[in-house]
Amino acid sequence: MSLLLVVVLLFFSSSCSVSSGQYYVSDDCSSVTQSPCHPLSVYAGNMSQYNNTIFYFIGSINIKSNVNLISVENVTLRGTKHSRINCIGNHFLIKYSSHVTFSQLLLYSCDIQCYYSNNFTVENSETFESIYFEAVNAFDFKFLSTTLRANSVTFNFNKQCGNSELLTYKLNFTNVYLVGQLLLYVSQGASYNTLVVLDNTFVHGHLNPTRSCVHVYHRNSLLSFSVKRSSFHSGWYGFSLFSLALEESKCAFSTTQLLCTISFEDSHFYSNKVAFFIKPNLINKHPLFILIKSCSIRDNTHYGLKIDVSLLSSVTINITDTELIGNAANYLVSCHSITLSNVTIANSLLTGLTLRQSIVTVNNSLIFRNNTGTTGGGLSITHSSYFIVLPQASFEFINNSATYKGGAFFCGGPFSHPFVYAEPHRDPPPLIPLTFSNNTAVTAGNDIYGFSIFGFSLANVSVSFSLINDPTISSTTDAVRICFCDFTPMQYITCHNNVPEQHIFPGQKVKFKVALFGYNSYGVSLSLTDGAVDLLIDDIKVFPYSLQEANCSYFEYSPAQFIYTRHKVVHSLPYNELVNNFAANSHIVSYYTLHECPIGFSMDSNLRTCTCSQGVSRENVTCDIASQNITHNGLLWIGTYDTSTPFNANATNPNACIINEDCLLYCSPNPVTFQLNDTDTQCADNRGQRMCGSCREGYSVLMGSSKCGQCHNNYMIIAWIALFAVMGVLLVVLLIALNLTVSVGTLNGLLFYANIVKLYEPVFSRKGALPVLSQVISWINLDFGFEICFYNGMDTYAKQWLQFAFPFYLWFVIIVIKQLCRRYGKISRLMGSHTVPVLSTLFLLSYTKLVCTIVVVLHKREVTLHCTNESVRSVSLWYDDPNVEYAKGKHAWLFGFALFVSIIFVIPYTLFVLLNPFIEKYLSNYKLFRKNWSHFKPIVDAYSGPMKDEYRFWPGLLLVARIPILVTATLVADSLIQAHYFILFLLLTVLAIVLSLGYIFRGVYRKRMHNILEVWFLFNLCMMVGFSVAYTDDSVVEIWFNTCLSLFTVSFMLIVLYHLYLQLSQAPWYNILVRKLFCKLCDDDGDDDEPLLDVTDSHKTVDEQRNDIVPSSTDVFMHRRESVVDLF
């Protein structure tokens, strides 16, 4: 019966399958000598009939449909030399088959699917451009000496029911180069054991968020994953394991404990985002064993190790003889059984190793070298992590650094010592070698932060260390003491338990210098540290603050409530076991008093700070109560009225008054920041006090300008007085010697020009004229022309007296000379008749200077005072020195003298020169008048002598023309730049009137040359005004201004030379010489046209004018003017 059954089976087998053998596959069988040969489509129609068969692929073969190997056994697909299979989007399907082999195949765009098969082998083959390789419950797979280029190589191991015994299925990769991802779904539970072996396998990942080199989804199943001599690089994860839930099943499994074993030996992980990653997604109670031995994990950009087994109850990790080099970080969480032996962690960027809720056993060496981090450069342990130390253990921390604290080692747990012996009762306890070298931290603890290495212990088990090289350790802990601090001259820190009480205003901050101290490496002495401090105000906790530096640090606090009283401030360390042992040093106490806003400030309820008070507030003015600084844009003065008595800036000053006024004369034009007790900052040119009216201490007002300077020699006043006395005499002598007087007719226009330019110099050019040109203008105006310190302590008041003194001194000199001429004949013959014209000239020279001085003295300024008691009142101050009250005190004398000079000289002189023709005409018939008039007649004739009879009022008209210009320029001297165009328009109007009148009168001078000179000077002034208006570029205006002044200076020198010629022409020897040289010109006396310059007509003195008297306007019976000498 049995024999019959066998015969029947063989019959049916022979009828359903082709006999075993070799078949050849080619798209062009005509070129193939072997047989049988057919295209693959011929065989693919029913592959199940080709058991125990080898298919040889010859040449390039294009697969035009899917190739299904279903229920086949012992089938081999083998390539030959130069063979190539192009799937063109089709795939190979292996299902319900066994012992299928792909050998020496070159596959392009071929996807392979394998379902419920076993003993599938891919050897010596290569795939290109494949999308996936997928296997489901495919057992005993082998990839041997094969290159796989596929997006994903996926194996899915599911449950199988009905196994009475535990079987092991193997997945083997040997000598494989995989470009893509190896993906394992292990969810068979205990139905069988999956053994995955990677030997000499190279996996190149894809570096995208969903790809790993090797990725395992593990669902509480039996798994043995063994890797040797392999490499994993350029993946998001080099190796990753996710623990998931196992689906429920009715299958009866073996009672074998579910164990997952993962081991890596002699392997490399590099250039991944994360090299080794384990993350459970749910609670797993089954054991997991991980071994990493003799591996290199380096240059991974996010993590080398990132293992979080917080949801796994039984995990054992053993890392031995392994290097973690150049990774960004290494992170272990909840690893309660991990052993490190001969492990080197180096060149990490974000802490060499971080332990959190982990217990690490150290066997042999653990080395941290050249790592950096924030808290802990080499090692950081937190949340109850600690080390179990075996006797042969050693630790090295070399060249690690932290940007915050713990350069080598940071301990952030609640324990004071993170080391325990593995054999605590060993006697004697072993000394553990410990090396610290060249570790640094920016804030605290170059070597250690958080515990004392030689101090306290964990669970009363002390670990003893032996320092290998440096016996000193830079170590500190969290703060156990707080104190107020300060720096000594040697930069040492001194501690104080008390500090002076502080006084502040709303918006200001209470400032403290505080230092924190922790234990050093021996747990006895204290060292600087950082940490948190609780702040209490009046025994109420306000907020905690942190000191970020292990140093004497500043802390500032701005009170939130404005209660104007004394307050208590407590700085307290947060409670912990260490602080509790030093309660006396755990807090410090100080006080501050909050005051109402100081002068110049008022409370702003919206901003909750002190801001500018009503008296200070205006556009472009800001107030900062923190520094009590006031800032404005310049040309403004803000300060207290009483600057002579400095007030206390920290007091309310109930009687103080504020001035807030424009200050264009002496104040700085630039933005300034100052305090009300130091208002001199607002001033320019070394000035100070109220509205910058006086010089600062040690400075004096300079002659020649309004600036203040220092006097270096107290005896220089004697030299200056002597110099000016001599200069005054020389000036008078020069005027007499050259007859440089108004009686000649050449000086009227020149003096008018010089007076106007001196007044308008800041308007014409902000930088002023060139030094030489400016000197000429100043001397003509009887000014010094250069800055000198006359005497130490001179102020504006004394300077104005001196301005009066010099003109009067010149008058005195000429009057003395005149009196000497009357008494002594020789002096009279020497001086001739020039004394009266010189006196008249000095009157005219002094007129502008005296009027300017009088206007300055009489210039008043009304200033508004804003007082603290909210009252507002006005005071009158002298404009030139607001420190002096107007017409009061010492200014009253100067004020009275200025009025006296105005009444005695300025007003009469102006009317006298202007109205002398009318006075002489209408009052000459009175005998009393004629008797007194004879004394003034020489002076009148000196001014009007060069004029035509009908225009003898012209010198007075030029005098009156000066007044509006002079008064305007003096009164607005502090705003010449701001009133630029108004002042120029006024000057242009005056010039136009004078020129128009001169044109209408067809010349007011008897000589044509004098008319031309005056018009020339007026035209020069018009050019200055025109250029100042036409050009906005200061450099261009300055060039034209100096050009016009140069022309004036040349004209002035020519006039001086002309006067010199007139005087020389009086000498006989000079006349003889001239007659010989110009004898032909002497024959031209009959020419009707009067020459512009009559060189033969020698100048006649006042005594010689007898023969050339011009008729008086009041004497109709005389044909010529009365002789000046006769009248005199």
Image (cartoon, rainbow, N blue to C red):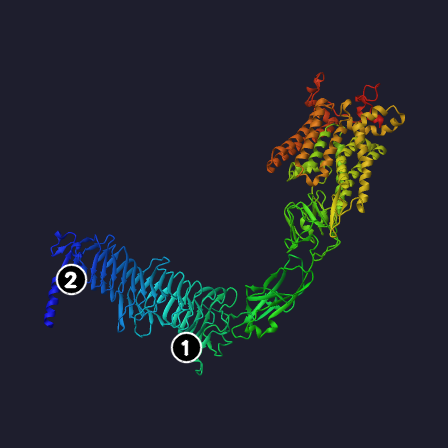
Query: Would you say residue 644 is visible in this rendering?
Result: yes
Depicted 899 relative to depicted 496: above or below: above
Return the mark for residue 126: none
Q: Nearer the viewer, mark 1 or mark 2?
A: 2
x then y, percent, for residue 647:
73, 55
Q: Nearer the viewer, residue 112 or 991?
A: 112
Q: How many marks are shown on the rendered structure?
A: 2
| Residue density around tag 2, few if under 14, some if 14–19, many if 20 or more, within 10 Å | many
Residue at 25% over, 54% down = 109
Asked if residue 608 lies left or right of residue 448, the reply is: right
Identify the amino acid type marked 2.
Thr
Return the mark for residue 53: 2
Secondary structure category for the residue under label 2 = strand
Depicted 163 relative to depicted 180: above or below: below
Q: Nearer the viewer, residue 261 or 293?
A: 261
**Mark closer to the chain start, 1 or 2:** 2
* Quadrant hosting residue 246: bottom left
* Quadrant hosting residue 797: top right
Return the mark for residue 390: 1
x then y, percent, for residue 1088:
71, 16
Asked if residue 815 lies left or right of residue 274, the reply is: right
Q: Nearer the viewer, residue 123 or 974?
A: 123
Figure quadrant of the N terminus: bottom left
